[in-house]
Image: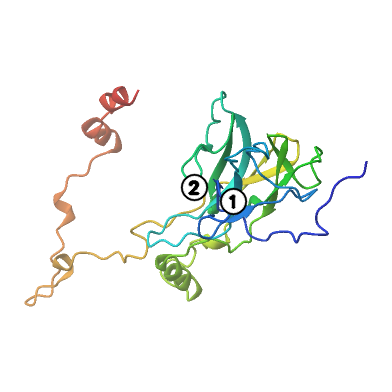
Amino acid sequence: MTELEFSADNVTPVVPITAMCIIADKNKAPRGFVPITKCQDDQSEADLWRDGFFTISRQVRYICTSTEIPDSNIRTPVQVITNLIIVRESDPIPHGYVAIDYTADSREKSLRKKYVCIRTEPRDRVVDAIGEIIILGKTKKVPRDYTSAGDIDSLLICYKVIPIPQTYGIQTSNSTSNLETQQTSGGLYPGLPNLSNSTPANLDVTGASGTSAFTMKNVGAPRVKAIDGIDFKVNPMFVKTDSNDGSSKLPDLSQFNHLEQNRIDDKYNYSFATEHAVLS
């Protein structure tokens, strides 16, 4: 049996999926969401509920995905979906995942006996994310470049991981822009590393199917401190000279007694024993 491929019919997505939901009416998808109504292999109905066709009040369920970046006045990191699994209703939800337990349009139970669980990560912490979700109705073999999330009512749910474009979802603040301008023009701290060009170490995470899944970026990149960019100046009251004799108002340091290092340690030593006891 030849290996399944879908690249001939579908262009590889270039942006990651940012949100996902389940709906009970394919005509009532939330704004910015696109329902998956057909199976990829045989073009049958991608209904996750699958009531009998002769049922009087037949229910349906469809997965919806969105690649839009939510508009918000609050500067929060853009979230992308990095993993997708199907779990039984009786099993605990895996740590770090969120279960889609209700439909977005009718607030009904999303599925029977199973949950679709997703894991999201801030865009600036990952370089790969889910870019496409497909549903297979007849084929039980996972296509090349896809990973199986599990099955629902004999339908196989698969997803494809894509690299995130380097500039996608990265928010730049005015302070960062000003810092880069100072570095370019040889400002106060020309030696400070450029944050946008830092390349932290990568951590490879392999999915359950054995295929390479996601690469997490180290969050230990250099950060800009609040005091960066502030000039160090001596208080003017100390540097102002006397108008009569021109002498400085700086205090005479000779009045301070000189102490040896061992005497300083004896006089000002503090063990922080109480603080250590509280923290332990």
Residue 127 x/y as whole percent: 62, 52
Q: Residues within 10 Å of mark 2 (few under 14, many from 20)?
A: many
Residue 153 is left or right of residue 171, and the answer is right
Quadrant showing the N terminus: top right
Identify the residue at image location x=51%, y=47%: 220
Color theme of the render: rainbow
Q: Are marks 1 and 2 in contact (CB under 8 Å)?
A: yes
Q: Is residue 117 left or right of residue 153?
A: left
Q: Is residue 142 above or below residue 7?
A: above
Q: Eyeballing the image, is 241 above or below 162?
A: below
The residue labelled by disc 1 is: 64
Q: Residue at x 65, y 46 (%)?
A: 215
Q: Residue at x 22, y 34 (%)?
A: 268
Q: Which residue is mark 2?
A: 104
Image position of 189 with respect to 48: above or below? below
Front-most of residues 231 and 19: 19
Residue farthest left in this picture: 244
| Left or right position of 49 against 103 | right
Residue 213 falls in image quadrant: top right
Binning the other alpha carbons within 10 Å of mark 1 as few (below 14), some (14 to 19) or many (20 upward) gives many
Is residue 200 visible in the rendered structure shown here? no
Tell me where residue 251 appears, x and y as whole percent. Answer: 14, 59
Secondary structure under tag 1 reads strand
